[in-house]
Every structure is written in C-alpha cells, then in structure tokens.
Amino acid sequence: MSDVNSILVKARQGDMLTAGELVTLLSITDQTELQSLYDCAYFLKEQYVGRIAYFRGIIECSNLCIKDCYYCGIRRSNQDVERFQMEEDEIFKEAIWAYEAEYGSCVIQSGERQDEGYIAMIERVVGRISKYTNGELGITLSLGEQTEETYRRWKNAGALRYLLRIETTNAALYARIHPADHSLEVRKECLAALRRCGYQVGTGVMMGLPGQTKLDLANDILFLKEIDIDMVGMGPYIPHSDTPMGKDAPPYTDKQKKEALTLGLKMIAVTRIVLKDINIAAATALQALEYTGREQGLRCGANVIMPNVTETDYRPKYQLYDNKPCLDENSSMCRGCLSNRITGIGETIGFKERGDSPRFKRRTAE
Ligand code: 5AD
Ligand code: FES
C-alpha cells in the first residue's frame, strides 16, 4: 500500500495523524491519490455532520479598518478604497433578509474598529436581530480583535459565534505579512477570550502565502485541534494589487489558480480528517479561483457556505483580494445561484436550521 493509502486507512478509522502524515497528504499531486483524499474527507463528513450545507448570509457592513495587514485590500493605508459604513438599520434589514430567505444564520463582518460608538452600535443591532427573530437566526460576528469586555457585551446582546482568523501560526511568517504592532500572541489571546465568553469559536488561516510551507499548514491544522476549535473558515491567499504584498505580483496565471485551488481543497479535506465534527466553511475565495470552487469545497469536506447578503452597491468596496466573485449580483441572485449549484452535487441545504457546530454541542454537554 502506498504511504498515502495507509495514512487514509488510519484516517478512516479515526486514528490521530502525525504532522509528517499531514504533510504527506498536503503534498499529494497524483490525481487518483487526490481523489482518495477527498473521498476519505467526504466519508468522514457524511458520518459526522451529514450531507447538508448550511447557509450563513454574510453582511459586509463596513470597510473602515484600523489594521494595516500587508495582504488585505481594505487595509488602513490603502487610499484607493472608498470607505463606507452601513447604518444600523441597513445591517438590521440585511439580517432580516437572510432570516426571511430561511438562512439559518447571518455573519456580520467588517474591518476592525474599536471605538465605543461602533461597539455600542453592534451591540444594539445584535440585540434587535436576536429579538426580532426570537433567537432563531444564529448571529455570528467577524469584527476582529476586541477586548474581552466587548466580546462579552456582544455575546450578552445575542451573538452566538465569532470568527477570527489566526491567518498563520508560524510566528516568523506572521511577522512578515503584518506590521510590527500586529501580534500573533494577541490574536491567540483573543481566541481564548472568545472561548471564555461562551461563543462557538471559529478561526482559520490563509493558504499559499509566499514562503509558507506544507509543514506550516500541517502545524496550522494541529493548532486548530489543540485549541479545540468549533468552526473553521480558511481560504487561499489571493494577491490584491493595492497592497504591499500584491503590488508587484502579476495576477495568478491559470496554472497558479489551479494550484491555489487544489491546495485550498486539500486543506479542507485534511482539516475534516483531523477535526471531524466541526463546521468548515467553503470560503468565497475558492470561487475567485474557479467558478465551482465553493461546491468543490463541499465535496472535499466543507459543510458551510456564506452567501453574500450585502447590498450590491457596497460590494465593490469590500474587496479583500482581487477577482472577488458576486460583485454585480444581488442577494436573491446569490441565493438562487448557490442553491442550484449545491443541490446539483446531491446535497441538501439546511434552510431554517441554525446548524450549530456539533463539536461545540458535544463539548458543552460534557
Ligand atoms: N487573500 C485572501 N484572503 C484574504 N483576507 C484578507 N486579505 C486576503 C487576501 N489578499 C482574509 C483574511 C481575513 C479575512 C477577513 O479575509 O484571512 O481574516
Ligand atoms: Fe487586516 Fe483587513 S487590514 S484583514
């Protein structure tokens, strides 16, 4: 039996894999072996979370940001972005749109802001959404690093989940892609604070960063396991031309897109194999690389999709990376388009179901 096949036999039995074995899986290039990896992840997905895709309507409510990450299109220093901030009522309206479209949850995401006015506005709108929907619509926040007190206020207002990507767990790589005052340790502390506040906690990394190795990625997955994460959202790094990391990088060739997509899919598959009963999102960035990228993510082990429910006019202003899909579409178009594509691969959509992380449920019941 090849190395890969014997590792996959262990994986199907639920055995823990070593970092070296994860590197072997992430390094697969042979098409048959790749398919075996994806099949193994799909087998475990069916067993632990089922063939159901959950929708989380994502509201990108502001591109104002105090951070300056070298890869991100809405970083503070990018002067070429027209900044916007939705009114509280607009955020509320879009969340209710998601509720009425029978999405189980919404995600409120923005650049990072830590001023009291913003914190209080989020607290109010979360409270209003929670009340209006009788707590039926799961509310997820993705609003960056905050104090534990802020996290607690938002949780008390009705937020259930929080997404905060660690981006990479390799300290040297983290330091290369961020300014000196952005800290990996602070990010880890924020994840710990979120857990203490009782959120379902999600994190993830970018794959294909310059200088990132397969071992880095294997270690990233082991980190997710170590902190016993409930949800994972990770995606391929895609250069943005108005950023320090992207300005001299030519757009990806078709070959580079394919490679980045394959790496993204392998990471989803290996994450499913290692973490089993968590929620894993098929990132929108997968679709920037290939039109069917998100469905392919579901086939490789992901079980969550985040359709955009942001007003179309705002979408071009929230470009974290180049070639972001769905900029001209409106929320109904995204709903129809994604629904067809998902039923096309034989999965059902968990409409009206919150789809909480089974891992979280199990841990809190223990
Ligand atoms: N390519 C891919 N993902 C990116 N993000 C920011 N910039 C990029 C990029 N150029 C991701 C980061 C961040 C999330 C909101 O968007 O991982 O956490
Ligand atoms: Fe950091 Fe946008 S500036 S993710």
Image (cartoon, grey):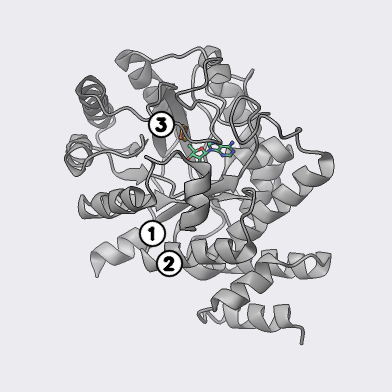
Q: Is residue 241 above or below residue 136?
A: above
**Badge 3 amino acid:** Lys
Q: CA distance from mark 1 to mark 3?
A: 24 Å
- Residue 67 - label: 3
Kindly identify the amino acid type of the residue bearing the numbered disc 2: Lys
Q: Which residue is mark 2?
A: 225
Q: Disc 3 beta carbon < 8 A from ligand 2? A: yes
Q: Is residue 288 left or right of residue 188?
A: right
- Quarter assignment of residue 31: bottom right
The label shown at residue 148 is: none
Q: Which residue is at a point 57% across and 43% down the rendered structure image?
A: 283
Residue depicted at 44% across the width and 33% down the height: 102
- Residue linked to disc 1: 229
Q: Disc 1 vs disc 2: Cβ atoms closer than 8 Å?
A: yes
On the image, the x and y values in percent for residue 229 come to: 38, 59
Residue 46 in view here: no
* Neighbourhood count class around disc 3 (C-alpha, 10 Å): few under 14, some 14–19, many 20 upward: many
- Residue 77: % across, % down: 48, 23
Mark 1 or 3: the one toward you: 3
Q: Residues within 10 Å of mark 1 (few under 14, many from 20)?
A: many
Q: Which of disc 2 and disc 3 is earlier in sequence? A: 3
For residue 178, above or below residue 191: above
Q: Is residue 360 above or below residue 281?
A: below
What's the residue type where badge 1 is placed?
A: Ile
Q: Disc 3 versus disc 2: distance between alpha carbons?
A: 28 Å
> Residue at image x 57%, y 61%?
217
Q: Nearer the viewer, mark 3 or mark 2?
A: 3
N-terminal label among 1 and 3: 3
**Residue occupying the far bottom of the picture:** 1
Q: Secondary structure at mark 3?
A: loop
- Figure quadrant of residue 128: top left
